Image (cartoon, rainbow, N blue to C red):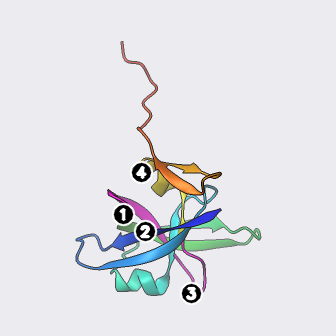
Amino acid sequence: MFAVLVELLSREGSRRIEVEVVVDTGATFTKIPGSIAERLGHVAEFRSRSRLGNGEIVERGIGPLLLRWGNITATVPVAVGGEGEIPVLGATALEILGLWVDPTGRTLVPRDSLDLLAVA
């Protein structure tokens, strides 16, 4: 795992915060501490159970925020974690942003979207 700097923006784009996030392809959702979520006006649209690395199950509120990495910006689902938890960039956001993980180079790589079903 490695960390990257992203910009999180409120849904309307008026509030923004730069956050260092750990890239974790094993995490379903991007996760930020409650204090950052509150500053961005994050509103949970649903709740989801998550299994932590230690096996513990927690329930988190999940809602949309804008996330920018480089010149790529998209609305992604973001979970609200507890204070002191490490911010994470999860697999769902990576897919939505169209990014692959280069573990050797410890960086993110833009990629084309996959559309593998051939239409006759």
Name the secondary structure under disc 1.
strand
Q: Does the magenta stretch include residue 77?
A: yes
Residue 16 percent coordinates (x, y):
32, 77
Q: In which quarter of the image is residue 23?
A: bottom right
Name the secondary structure under disc 3.
loop
Marker disc for residue 83: 3
Whether tag 2 and tag 4 are in contact, CB under 8 A, the answer is: no
Question: How far apart are labels 3 and 1 at the CA level?
Answer: 23 Å
**Dot 3: within a 10 Å radius of its alpha carbon, few (fewer than 14), some, or many (20 or more) residues?**
few
Whether tag 3 and tag 1 are in contact, CB under 8 A, the answer is: no
Q: Name the residue under label 2.
A: 6
Residue 29 percent coordinates (x, y):
52, 62
Residue 6 percent coordinates (x, y):
43, 68
Residue at the front extreme? 105
Q: Mark 1 points at which residue?
A: 68
Q: In this view, does 70 lie to the left or right of 84?
A: left
Query: In the displayed structure, would residue 117 be above or below residue 87?
Result: above
